[in-house]
Image (cartoon, rainbow, N blue to C red):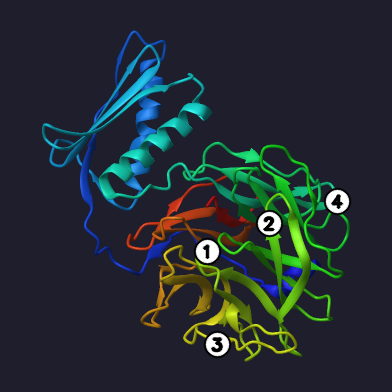
């Protein structure tokens, strides 16, 4: 049995329905998206209807708009002439807010879908002053049966689950991706864990071309990497000292690891697990079972000094077997998975009020939450089995909305989702 399993509880069995416990309080802006008009276009009516459905779905799940049939609120008009798309946003009747011109449609749905997602995010920004998440990608591990057991590879998809693309080709066991953004000199990359050389190690690869290389030099098993977008650090778990401890590695995209990894939390008899950096990189939340059942702890990274264990402050109290913490990008919440009445649910910890809430309910286990860049949506995976095979799908949930949206389906166990930053 693979080592990573001892870091996370084994869960089984499942159900069909997911219901959110929190009710909607936010005001949703009414928006009408008109049918796409077209002149002298080579694109068929059915194709344009498909594009219309994509952008309508983006606004339906975007968390800030309420789709309406008429001109009650804002109106989005879209026209295609000679495969060039023009979109006009009227934020109230007769008042033009924004026009997007000359968006070229290729006639290939996988490419034009991305164009519609980007258009949805631009309209969202005009309406609310911030970009949406429609054009953001999701990365995850997909586990499938093979002739000698199982293999797992890292995949990506759009925020609605479409445009599936396999990234890794280890033909082994690859899990837990984490995204590294591009800069002026370096392409965007992924960190992930692979067992291709025996024990699990952390690898990096550019997203444009799969060319993996070992990311961190440290003996023993390396697991559960997470990247700090602002402080250029990677946190991970390793048993190099004999038990599962939390390590920190300075890491710059393009250059890779800088210096040696630092063991920042170790306690005899305790297992440390998954972690998440605060948005400013000053704190790290992680899992430890140092007080028997796994809970979420918080370390102020400024308190780390050589030869001295930093204080790890326990922040979760109410629910059992906490795993998978994820800071919201606005720094207000931490999402995590916990066992509630025997079933793993997605929970929220409010860092200001210290309040803990259960976000989901239903009798299907839910794990590995990850906040979207807008601090409003969370992606997570369910887990269970059917006919002796593991099943897991990805769900998108708005923390103010009662209905999670399933975005994947089909063969394979999809788990460990994470967002493009």
Indicate the quadrant where residue 300 lies: bottom right
Nearer the observer, 125 or 10 = 125
Q: Residue at x 51, y 65 (%)?
A: 364
- The residue at which mark 3 appears reads as 313
* Tag of residue 252: 2
Give the number of the mark in front: 1 or 4: 1
- The residue at which mark 1 appears reads as 369
Q: Is the Cβ of the residue at disc 1 closer than 8 Å to that at disc 2?
A: no
Q: Distance between the residues labelled 1 and 2?
A: 25 Å
Q: Distance between the residues labelled 3 and 1?
A: 21 Å
Q: Which of marks 3 and 2 is nearer the N terminus?
A: 2
Q: Is the Cβ of the residue at disc 3 closer than 8 Å to that at disc 1?
A: no
**285 on left or right of 225:** left
Query: Residue 95, image x and y in percent?
Result: 13, 34
Q: Residue at x 41, y 56 (%)?
A: 374
Q: Earlier in the sequence, mark 4 or mark 3?
A: 4
* Tag of residue 148: 4
Give the number of the mark in front: 3 or 2: 2
User: Regarding mark 2 in the picture, which secondary structure is present there?
Assistant: strand
């Amino acid at each position: 049995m693979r080592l990573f399993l001892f870091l996370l509880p084994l869960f089984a069995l499942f159900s069909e329905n997911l219901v959110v416990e929190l009710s909607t309080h936010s005001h949703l802006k009414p928006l009408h998206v008109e049918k796409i008009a077209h002149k002298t276009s080579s694109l068929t009516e059915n194709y344009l209807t498909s594009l219309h459905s994509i952008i309508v779905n983006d606004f339906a799940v975007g968390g800030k708009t309420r789709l309406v049939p008429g001109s009650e609120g804002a109106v989005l008009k879209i026209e295609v002439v000679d495969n060039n798309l023009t979109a006009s946003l009227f934020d109230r009747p007769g008042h033009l807010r924004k026009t997007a011109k000359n968006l070229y449609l290729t006639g290939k749905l996988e490419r034009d879908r991305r164009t519609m997602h980007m258009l949805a995010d631009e309209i969202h920004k005009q309406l609310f002053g911030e970009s949406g998440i429609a054009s953001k990608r999701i990365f995850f591990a997909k586990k499938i049966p093979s002739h000698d057991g199982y293999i797992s590879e890292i995949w990506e998809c759009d925020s609605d689950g479409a445009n599936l693309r396999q990234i890794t080709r280890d033909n082994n066991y690859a899990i837990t991706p984490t995204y590294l953004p591009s800069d002026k000199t370096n392409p965007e990359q992924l960190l992930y864990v692979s067992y291709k050389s025996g024990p699990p190690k952390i690898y990096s690869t550019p997203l444009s071309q799969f060319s993996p290389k070992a990311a961190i030099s440290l003996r023993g098993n390396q697991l559960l990497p997470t990247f700090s977008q602002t402080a250029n650090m990677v946190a991970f778990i390793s048993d190099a000292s004999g038990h599962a401890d939390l390590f920190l590695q300075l890491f710059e995209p393009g250059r890779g690891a800088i210096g040696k990894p630092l063991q920042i939390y170790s306690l005899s008899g305790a297992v440390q697990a998954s972690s998440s950096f605060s948005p400013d990189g000053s704190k790290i939340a992680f899992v430890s079972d140092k007080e028997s059942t796994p809970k979420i702890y918080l370390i102020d990274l400024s308190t780390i000094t050589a030869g001295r264990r930093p204080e790890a402050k326990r922040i979760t109290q109410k629910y059992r077997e906490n795993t998978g913490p994820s800071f919201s990008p606005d720094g207000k919440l931490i999402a995590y998975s916990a066992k509630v009445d025997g079933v793993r649910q997605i929970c929220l910890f409010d860092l200001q009020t210290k309040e803990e809430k259960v976000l989901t309910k239903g009798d299907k286990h839910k794990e590995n939450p990850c906040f979207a860049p807008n601090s409003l949506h969370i992606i997570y995976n369910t887990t269970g089995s059917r006919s002796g095979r593991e099943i897991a799908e990805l769900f998108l949930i708005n923390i103010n909305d009662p209905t999670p949206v399933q975005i994947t389906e089909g063969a394979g166990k999809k788990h460990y989702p994470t967002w493009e930053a």
